[in-house]
Image: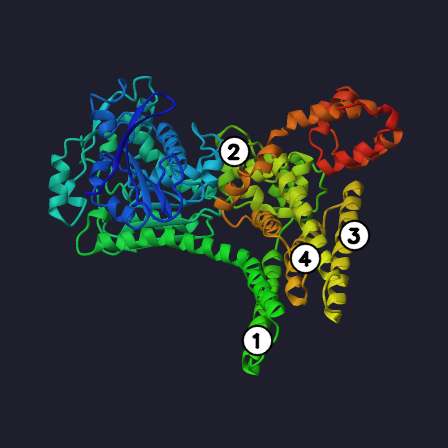
Amino acid sequence: MGDYTEEWITTGDGMKLYTRRYLPPAGEGVAKGKWRVSGIKAAILFVHGFIEHIGRYEHVFPKYSSAGIAVLSYDQRGFGRSALDVANRCSSAKYGKTSWAEQHSDIQTMLNLLREGISNEVPIFLMGHSMGGGLALSFPTRPPTASFIPKSETVLGLSGVIATSPLIRQARPAPAWQVGAGGLVSKLPFGNSINVPAEVKAEDLSHDPAVGVAYKEDPYVKFMGTTKGVYDMLTGGKELAEHDVTNWPPELPLLVIHGTEDKVKLGEMTSTWWLTLLQVCSCPASEKFVKEAPAKDKTYVPFEGGYHELHNEPDGVQDKLFQTVSGMSDSTLGSLATTVVIVALPLLLRVVVARIESFRQQTGPVQGQTNGKQNKLAKTSTSMRLTVALYSFLALGMWYSSQTDLFTRLRLPITATGDQIRSALITQRPPEFIPLDLQRAYQHGNTNGLNIHRGSRTSHPLFTPELDRTLQRIETFDIRLMYSRLGHSVIASCDWCTTRDDYLLFSAVGLSLGYIALLCIVGIVTEASERRKSRTYAVVLVALAVGLDIFCTGLVKGSLRKGDRVQYYPRAQLCRLALHVILPNVLLMLPHNAPYLTQETFISTVQALAALSHVSTAQQSTIKNTRYAGLVREASLGSWADVTSRKIDAVLDDDEFRTMLDQVRPPAAEADQGKPAVERLKEWAGRMTGETLRELDGYIPASRKQPP
């Protein structure tokens, strides 16, 4: 039994939940977070299974904490101490009384608690066993019609989801009429108060007989549930396997572990409908779920011969399970470390080369110094410069990744309406934008009374929920611009990047820092102590970069005003970004004695570029918490429109401005045709980018300008 800290947490609806946290010993570094612990390399929120509690994992969690992985666990509502501790529990708590929506809401609460307790840079994994495994898998896949939908930033903040022996599908499901009858009972006002027997065969948990004996004698284990809790658990797994699996975020890693001999049974063959289910947690269902999930990084690990509770299996299975789970966090940390090393490599090499050159200039050739030492020093400097050059090409390849522009792919103008985009997506069915089985989608639409017919060019939000979420995020004009630039992955997996404030952060701030770097390069190159051809080449390269930037910007503006498809916008932005990465390294190719790029400027530039690539959630959180990002976020959409409305009032009579407006703005919806011009223009102003607003300012006559 390892050391842990107990705490009772009150949820938003007043329920009190018993929690335990296992923290690693204090390590190196500054203690961060509410819990003030240093040396944490990863953290896990653990969700236990049906009719059990976290006290059954006292021998498991200390292994993780000793390996530097913090664990937060809790007795779910309706189970363990949260239901049976009379002195501390909520007065409305009852054993087995729970629901799918409430359990997901509790996971949201605990993830917030875990994030507050540790540093923002620590990756967090959601892990669950059995029923908890099903909850962990369904948490990031909630459809828009669900009773509870987790916050997008919480899902994006996860570094991975781990499920052991998850409850997804049953090997022998109950007849449909029995499930329907149970569902009707569970939906009654008193459905969550009707107790039902739900015995689990203890001998099927583990090959170790002592585990079954302890399970039967455990005072916090009661073999009962409620109609609502059992119905939600079983039907929730069914919906997860049949529909919600397609909602899995592509960038969220997935690890599912299951014993091939899992034969745990819920109840006996009786007349009660929910007790006729055998083999509640199906190993083939877990494998099928992993195959169908659209995750880019997904792994299914079968444990041959393993029973339901792999963490209680003898003969080294427990250690193998620990190594498999901890290996996922180690691989995530390894990828983050690799990213940090790649991003920081130019700065480190720049410092080393500067030290070497400074040493050579200060000391000069010393009498008696051998030619061998001079050659060795020269070779070292050359090797470092060559390494930087290779890094530049690597960065160029990283940035020049393939992207698919939605509007070009569908042959639509960037001002196309949401209905036009929906129709084009449904009729053309590009696989990179609709990871759905349309046959299932049609059935889903007809089931909900939408009367969707094959070949229909219109749809309903309930028709394709994944598609509807994407379209909602690109409704505004400025978001469409950023979508064309950054590609589909941003819309699919990054909510906070699709807001106006973060568009300014990633576009205006990153571009400004890039030009600051270019100016520093020009200053250093012109002060080089020796005149060489390389200096001339560098100046020409800088001039070409600035010229290409201006040229591409002009092309983009021209295409937008003509209403054409943005065919070259992503490529132009990638070229610009690659130049911003490669140009600072020109410094290492030149002999000079002038001051080099300051550490602060270079690091800021690297941070902006790293944020654009979305290499990790931790980096996103770091940039979100910077002072500038906080100031930018204060300029909300509404306040932005209020500030600019006075400018629009001043130019309503300007014919030249109206002409420009008609060329750039999206066509007004039919519902807006009857609105006054002032009202329509004010609404449109709230959707304009900062760049367009600056152009608007140029159209305002000086005599009409009013103070903000």
Instruction: Name which quarter of the figure residue 130 lies in.
Output: top left
The local secondary structure at tag 3 comes to helix
- Judged left or right of residue 632, residue 75 is left
Q: Amino acid at mark 4?
A: Leu
Above or below, comparing residue 574 to residue 73 in the picture = below
Residue 484 x/y as whole percent: 66, 45
Of 115 and 139, the residue lying toward us? 115
Q: First in sequence: mark 2 or mark 1?
A: 1
The reply to whether discs 4 and 2 touch (Cβ–Cβ < 8 Å) is no
Q: Are marks 1 and 3 in contact (CB under 8 Å)?
A: no
Residue type highlighted by circle 3? Phe
Q: Nearer the viewer, mark 3 or mark 4?
A: 4
Sequence order check, earlier mark of 1 and 3: 1
Which numbered dot is residue 379? Answer: 1
Mark whose residue sits in front, 1 or 4? 1
Relative to 282, residue 496 above or below: above
Q: CA distance from mark 1 to mark 3?
A: 40 Å
